Amino acid sequence: MSYSKRQFIKHVAAVSALTSIHPLFLTSASTTPPKNEVNVFPIGMGTWITFNVGQDKALRLQRAQVLKTFFELGGQMVDSSPMYGSAEEVLGFCFQQLNGTNNLFSATKTWTSSLPEAKQQFVDSQQRWQLPNFDLLQVHNLVAWQQNLAMLRELKQQKLIRYIGITTSHGRRHNELLKIMQNQEIDFVQLTYNIDDREVERRILPLAHERGIRVIANRPLQGGRLMDLTNNKALPSWASKIGCHNWAQFFLRFIISHPAVTCAIPATSKVEHMVENMGSVNNIPLPNAQERIKMINAFKAL
Amino acid sequence: MMTEWFSYSLEDFLLFSPEVYWRLIQQHSVNFGAIAIVIEVIAIIAFYYLKHNHKRQIVITILIGAWCSVGWFFFIKQYAAINTFAQYLGYACLIQSLFLLISLLKERTSIQQVSLTMSVDTWSRLQNNVTLICLSSVIIFPVLAALLGFNWGTGVIGILPLPTITISLISVLLFKSRMRLFLLPIPTILLVIELLTLKVLLNA
């Protein structure tokens, strides 16, 4: 099953509707259409912690099953980093097991302040993922971003990568991120956004939308903490009407229903959790602005 | 910038799951298998011999081997696969081996020649007690590991950091005061890192 055009149009329609009716979530220039034509399935896959399994063969094979399920259910964006221990290498192993990468949208990062090391890191990433090109290369946590963005632009010119981006997490260094978004030509920004961490709704998401910068939401489940909060707690009775059949879908649909968000990247090591996550994209329209407020209130009441 | 650092929690520095860590520990000690038996026997004999002959050189030699082994085989070859910073810990272990090697060259003097503020009798008693604690630790750690459900090799000196660090810190009491200054920092720092790692993993 893949993310069909019909599903994508529905997603875009829901996103557009939200953009036009809810100033809470987009406060400036919300009518400007995104300039980057990047259409990816709105649920991606993070590899932070979950794919760092070292040489353990049994765990590697198990992760290959998780990735297989991801692709089978239409997934595209896989995000990793040289900082995630063996995650990149394990991904390469998994791709080999799966005999290909299907609709993969490959996203990795540069994580060093030394330029020669950054260049080497890209070569290492190519070898570990076993890919000649990447769809997206991001500056990890703003590390030496001036120098690294220049290198990323070179790689883009050489057609070794399609898009460049910059990342932050845990709600850190938002002011600096804003300045970069205002003054630099970047295609993607990755940041922490979930129902509990919503600071980016004030300035960053509106700016991203205004400038046509695609947004990847990391820590969509707060590294599992949101799921822990919902232990033994029933979903609101109206949740199924907005397409949520479990708490993971509740939290993920909240994120991807934001007009500025391109993709959320939950990480999991379990096939059943991957199935739940991917089920967040279904035939029911994404929550609208009023429903999003209802979701926030339901979360606060937990 | 400082406030940003305070926003990090211990969990943010561990990029692997408890499941992966415990499997790595278990697998590493299993891989050492027969070697663990040999190391254990040598360690028991060495500390027993030390108790009766006060020859520190043999224990220092074992500690050099133990730190090299933990640094290279555990930190650099195994742990670095899931923890980017582990290779630096491995290098620290190799530096500790170097310090121990220097100590070995300096520890040629016999017990009677050691210049300390305490009497030879007191020094001798202290040395006996420290040796006894080391000997007990060498035996107790593998038993403890087995009782906790791990491979017994997990508790053998030279295979994993915790037994190696603990026994090294106790052994330092056997050294001349000046050398202790060089032999204490690395095991102490590693002990703190190990305990913090365990704290995070057990709370996860």
Image (cartoon, coloured by chain):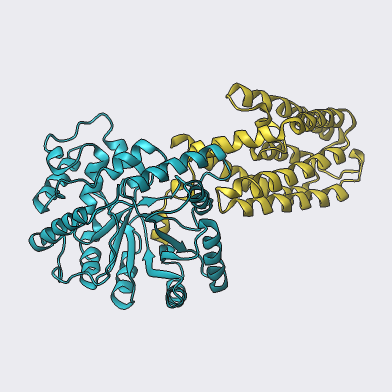
Looking at this rendering, what residue extends furthest in the top direction?
Answer: B147
Residue A80: x percent and y percent?
Answer: 44, 55
- Depicted A288 relative to depicted A116: above or below: above
- Depicted A29 relative to depicted A126: above or below: below
Q: Nearer the viewer, residue B171 or A290?
A: A290
Q: Is residue B184 left or right of residue A103?
A: right
Q: Nearer the viewer, residue B137 or A84?
A: A84
- Which residue is drawn at the image coordinates 15% and 38% (left, top)? A240
Q: Can you say which quadrant of the picture contains the N terminus of chain B?
A: bottom left
Q: Is residue A251 left or right of residue A57?
A: left
Q: Nearer the viewer, residue A276 or A283?
A: A283
- Which residue is drawn at the image coordinates 46% and 74% (left, top)? A155
- For the question of whether residue B199 can be seen, the reply is no
- Depicted A179 relative to depicted A40: above or below: below
Residue A179: x percent and y percent?
Answer: 31, 73
Colour of chain B, in one word, is yellow
- Which residue is drawn at the image coordinates 33% and 76% (left, top)? A185
- Name the quadrant containing residue B78: top right
Task: In the picture, one chain is cyan; tell me its letter.
Answer: A
- Name the quadrant containing residue B62: top right
Residue A250: x percent and y percent?
Answer: 22, 42
Q: Can you say which quadrant of the picture contains the C terminus of chain B?
A: top left
Residue B109: x percent and y percent?
Answer: 91, 45
Q: Is residue A264 left or right of residue A51?
A: left
Q: Is residue A212 left or right of residue A103?
A: left
